[in-house]
Amino acid sequence: MKALLAAALILGSISPAFSATRISPVCSRQSAPLGLPTGSPPARKLVEANAYTPVARAALKLAYAIETGQPDPYIGVTGNFDGTGLSLGIIQFNFLGSIQSAFGKIDKAKFNEKMPVWGEQFYAAVHTASPSAAVEKVLPMQDARYSQRTHKTTWVIKPDALRELRAFLASDEARTAQDNAASRVYQRGYSRALQWAQERGDTKPTAREIASFVDNEVFSGGALGGIWIKQAKSFRSNFDNDGEMIAFVSAWLKSCPYKGEGFLYGEIDSANAVAAWAAKYPPGAKLDDDKALLFAFGFLRALTANGPPTLKGQRDQHGIFKAQVVARRSLPALGVGTANGVSWPGGVLD
């Protein structure tokens, strides 16, 4: 029966996953029940984690590269594209709390020294606990430009604000603060990877699992969307082999709208992923458990990705990151494709 259902998937009519769980093979920004076993991820138990081992440095470097695309990631600055005000530095800290935590202990004089025009405003935002209130404080540093053609709003940081933010981030104080914060991010990601590996049946995580959960801390603040290994195993079990599972997710990505009212982010990365998966993982492919379960987790996590909050006067952005989450989570899982144009580095992470 599974083989017949898989053949139907190739014809684009039905899929094993849809038949068993009601997960639609058609991409959508809207959320829907997954039909998988219930159960939340376990509470995180922090463990000691050395952020300076080769694997740790490689995992953080990968996250830095994906987030910033900057030769000097410490000074990476991105505008309010995701509703979090600004994204800054090596792992794109934002005003959901990580900017406040990373830079909150730097003396006010350093803000004013490096940011003579915007220092007072930026300092006030850094010391505002409420994410929405902090975002409002930094919006004057940017210009919002809406495109009728793409239905996207682009936030462009004003030239003087950009210069000052980069000067602040380049200071010794801000670089040290970023390193300290990144070490805490690595600890949280490693702790999650360890929990995942133990439930998979191993005593320690693979390098791929470490890279995946560290990047999830950076990209999603550690949020798991209610998805854990139980759901990943259940989704995988609906297919005769892992090649069928990859084909299902490929079909889902191909169906995503990338223009118009219901657009999703990640068109280029998604196309890269689909092509790379087809070349490396043909029908019938069998993956190691760590790869297969990370891949299943990434797809299910994408389906629960709500997207940024809708700002006053802006269009609803619910679900616009779903395809991007698939591409980004599949990069450490399968080792092919791209995330924000960045390829899998291999080496100690393989």
Image (cartoon, rainbow, N blue to C red):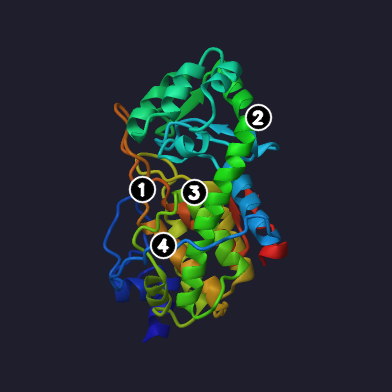
Q: How many marks?
A: 4
| Separation of marks 1 and 3 at Cα, in angstroms | 15 Å
| Separation of marks 1 and 2 at Cα, in angstroms | 34 Å
Neighbourhood count class around disc 4 (C-alpha, 10 Å): few under 14, some 14–19, many 20 upward: few
Neighbourhood count class around disc 3 (C-alpha, 10 Å): few under 14, some 14–19, many 20 upward: some
For residue 170, which numbered disc appears in the image?
A: 2
Image spot of residue 151 (x, y percent): 39, 33
Image spot of residue 226 (x, y percent): 34, 61
| Separation of marks 3 and 4 at Cα, in angstroms | 18 Å
Mark 1 falls on what kind of element? loop
Q: Is residue 294 above or below residue 68?
A: below
> Which amino acid type is marked by label 2?
Ala
Q: Residue at x 62, y 52 (%)?
A: 60
Q: Residue furthest bottom?
A: 1
Question: Which quarter of the rendered picture does the C terminus lie within?
Answer: bottom right
Mark in front: 1 vs 4: 4
For residue 319, which numbered disc appears in the image?
A: 1
Residues at circles 1 and 2 in contact by the CB criterion of under 8 Å: no
Image spot of residue 72 (x, y percent): 69, 36
Residue 18 in view of the camera: yes
**Residue marked by disc 4:** 44
Q: Compare marks 2 and 4 and give the one earlier in the sequence.
A: 4
Q: Residue furthest right?
A: 347
Mark 4 falls on what kind of element? loop
**Residue marked by disc 3:** 219
> Which amino acid type is marked by label 1?
Gly
> Which amino acid type is marked by label 3?
Phe
